[in-house]
Amino acid sequence: MTLEQQLPALQVILPLFGALICALMRRGSLAWGIALGVSFAMPVISGVLLAEVLSNGPISYHLGGWAPPWGIEYRVDTLGAYLLMLISAIGALIMPYARASVAREISADKQAWFYTMYLLCLTGLLGIAITGDAFNIFVFLEVSSLSTYVLIAMGKDRRALLSAYQYLIMGTIGATFYVIGIGLLYSVTGTLNLVDLTARISEIGPSRPVLAALAFLEVGISLKLALFPLHVWLPNAYAYAPSVVTAFLAATATKVAVYLYLRFLFSVFGVSVVFKGLPVPEILLALSIAAMFGASLVAVFQDNIKRMLAYSSVAQIGYITLGIGLANKMGLTGGVVHLINHAMMKGALFMAIGAVVYRVGSARLEDFAGIGRRMPLTMAVFTLGGLSIIGTPGTVGFVSKWYLAVGALDKGWWWLMFLLVASSLVSVVYIGRVVEVIWFRPLLHTGTTVREVPLAMLVPMLLLATATIYFGIDTTLTAGIAGRAVDMLLAGLS
Amino acid sequence: MAVFSEIVSHYNHWITIFLMVSGLYIVVARGNMVKKLVGLSLFQTSVYLLYLSPGKILGGTPPILDPNFAVYSNPLPHVLMLTAIVVGVATLALGLALVVRINEEYGTIEEDEIFPVKDDE
Amino acid sequence: MKLDLIFRITTKLILPFILMFALYVQFHGDYGPGGGFQAGVITAAMVILYAIIFGLPAAQKVVPARLAELMIPLGALIYASVGAVAMLLGGEFLNYSVLLSDGPHGQELGILLVEIGVLVTVAGTMTAIFYSFAGRGR
């Protein structure tokens, strides 16, 4: 087999090998070097896979040489390749940033283990996006979740341990619900391959075990997605984890759960079972609106900026699920394109906050007073990301909200469009609060160490911030591919 | 009468549901962190039963190829549950390690004693 | 003291049989319940029993903590390397039939090697977990 044919397997194996070699290392800088090499190789592989899928259609790789549905199949289609590109790109941008940040926030004897866990998390997330076997998804889900718990527990504050524990309990319940759903499906259809499941469920239709499986799968995946009201683990986990971990997780972990949600809702179960069997769109709409408003309002009153951005993430996930609940072409495109857009915005925002934590040592709002004068580029990144969250025209946030609004109008729901605009106004309040403090207050921390962060930390942030502007103006790559993925999803059986 | 025998013949599913619900109840209702982990393990055990009990085919032999037998029990659920058991063990080990560290940091593992403690933001 | 003596002598007699049983479970995983994970746990149970009866420092002289921590990625590397060798020989990842000229014999060899990898990792992991829990609070 040629190298190009082996790429789907290499996408998952390279981070795994990298993780195992990092585990043998003693020195943090060597482990960082390995993680850097692997992280830079990932977007190359994902890019080739994406180009291949866009021109030639889905790629199928038979693990172990066994043909599906008996063997495990790695199946890359448009939506999957889109997500692979997202995860790889974020991983590649985080790694140069991570060296200084990790050296500051994590003790020296644990740094090699940090990079091991990071690469395992990367393996798990990439594996979920690439595999076409339902139980293999569970395996990779648990690989990424367990390494995430460890990464979060490495935070300096002792509340990081509590957050990791809470996330462990809730995440394991979510993963176990997922396994229960797959078990019910397996006992009804006899197969675990996603394509085969699609065919057999369409023969069976909305019978009771199929609907029960759908319910278990949805609740399980919603726990990982941080859909309101199952989002309780997210603010604590993001607030007390190391800055690199928060930036990486905020940009990738929940997006992969959304991918799973889309895959099961539209591809495996199909529109006919889901929308006629259970009132899924209504429930999603209600929960999304609750997330959008509730989480944004709570974010206004936070004093810890990381926590505020975490609640903002819950609200933004509400936008994504709103797009899924609308379930028409425009709404769903808005939801899918918001996957990449939100990853860019939140990645840039959390990296900027991490840079301030690197210099100042705290993420509290009052410690950010006047920082804009000493760290202008970092705060420019934050301001751009904040404008994007609000949905200013010319940024990626506006693109997603535009698609969502058009999708709402396509269904004739004017009230939903007004709700979208109203929730954006709430985000103006919490972003504006921070912007006022960082630019317009007198400087609090006047030590000489409070200056711009090193170039290795600055360049990834600036790249992401530029991306939020660039992809807000030229949307062919993001919204174009999202549109093609949505066409494939809405076509029903894949 | 037919309904009664229908219900009783699915006893494996009733046991699964009982374990599942009691595990979830323990996770939700108990504030001691180790007890929560025990409840989580109980919940995961019910999932093993959910997969394994339909795997036994009535009249099937163990799944080793033999020319005398035509009906074999399904080996795939056992393989899947082996993976799930390992995942459960890893989760339990990680959870207990976190509890040990929380005990060192806070001095207690009862949630209602930990939550009122207000650290500096 | 007297009870201590009974434990110590019994443990010394039992330990080799535990290891032999672990290896039996390991190599008969093809034909009955068993395989790498179960064998690894039994092997670790042997080390843990020794540590409980004879004390943690004595156990750490036999199986140093550093060795246990090294075994964890080593076993997984063995497993992943078998798959990588299969890829280099022209098959897909973890396609055992390309490992030898004869398909089914290649499968046997491949499964044997990956199970050894699983044994090493699981034994190392369980022992390392025990060492990290037992060594605290002293």
Image (spheres, coloured by chain):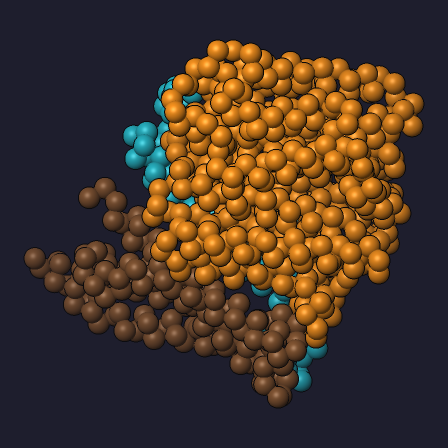
**Could you say which is closer to the camera, residue A215 or residue A92?**
A92
Number of numbered labels in the structure image: 0
Quadrant in the picture for the N terminus of chain A: bottom right
Question: Quick check: A132 above or below B102?
Answer: below
Rendering colour (chain B)? cyan
| Residue B90 in the image, given as x and y percentages of width and height | 46, 51
Q: Can residue A253 be spotted in the picture? A: no
| Residue A139 in the image, given as x and y percentages of width and height | 59, 54
> Residue drawn 77% across and 39% down?
A336
> Residue drawn 62% across and 79% down?
C89
**Could you say which is closer to the camera, residue A268 or residue C15?**
A268
Give the chain letter for brown: C
Quadrant position of residue A93: top right
| Residue C114 in the image, given as x and y percentages of width and height | 51, 72
The residue lying furthest to the bottom in this view is: C101
The residue lying furthest to the left in this view is: C1
Q: Can residue C16 be spotted in the picture? A: yes
> Residue drawn 71% across and 15% down?
A425
> Residue drawn 36% across and 62% down?
C70
Q: Tell me: A294 left or right of A68.
A: left
Quadrant position of residue A490: top right
| Residue A133 in the image, given as x and y percentages of width and height | 69, 58
Rendering colour (chain A)? orange
Question: Quick check: A155 above or below A298?
Answer: below
Q: Tell me: B107 left or right of A432.
A: left
**Could you say which is closer to the camera, residue A24 or residue C15?**
A24
